[in-house]
Image (spheres, rainbow, N blue to C red):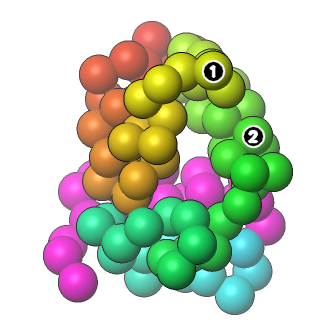
Amino acid sequence: MSTQSPLESEVAQLIVESLNLEEVQAAGIDPEAPLFREGLGLDSIDALELALAISNKYGFKLRSDDENNKAVFASLRALARHVEQHRQN
């Protein structure tokens, strides 16, 4: 498992808290592992809740019709990179 960057740690904590993943430790999320299916096992409802949490915390919207969503939500590392590029605060 690779080491989380500070922003990856922050986003991992947001994932755990916003989705109430009581059995998951934010520090234990592999930044390169998939978030959906075989990785954390998130589903489409989780994606909506996570998009809302990101919007509230970082000040930009993740649109459900964005063709890049699969790449954005591919892993913690990809999601943190997207946040870094788009955050307003």
Q: Which residue is mark 2?
A: 48
Q: Residue 78's x, y, as percent? A: 32, 46
Say which amino acid is labelled 2: Leu
Q: Is residue 15 above or below residue 21?
A: above
Region of the chain picked out in magenta, as a range = 1-20
How many marks the image carries: the answer is: 2
| Image position of 62 (left or right of 26) | right
Q: Is residue 67 above or below residue 5?
A: above
User: Where's the C terminus, which quadrant?
Assistant: top left
Q: Which mark is residue 65?
A: 1
| In front: label 1 or label 2 | 1
Dominant SS in magenta: helix
Q: Is residue 88 above or below residue 22?
A: above
User: Where's the N terminus, which quadrant?
Assistant: bottom left
| Image position of 30 (left or right of 39) | left
- Residue 17 placement: quadrant: bottom right
Q: Residue 73's x, y, as percent? A: 47, 47
Q: Residue at x 36, y 72 (%)?
A: 33
Examine the structure image and report whether residue 11 is included in the region drawn in magenta.
yes
Q: Residue at x 18, y 76 (%)?
A: 2
- Residue 53 appears in view: no
Q: Residue at x 43, y 75 (%)?
A: 29
| Image position of 22 (left or right of 35) | right
Say which amino acid is labelled 1: Asp
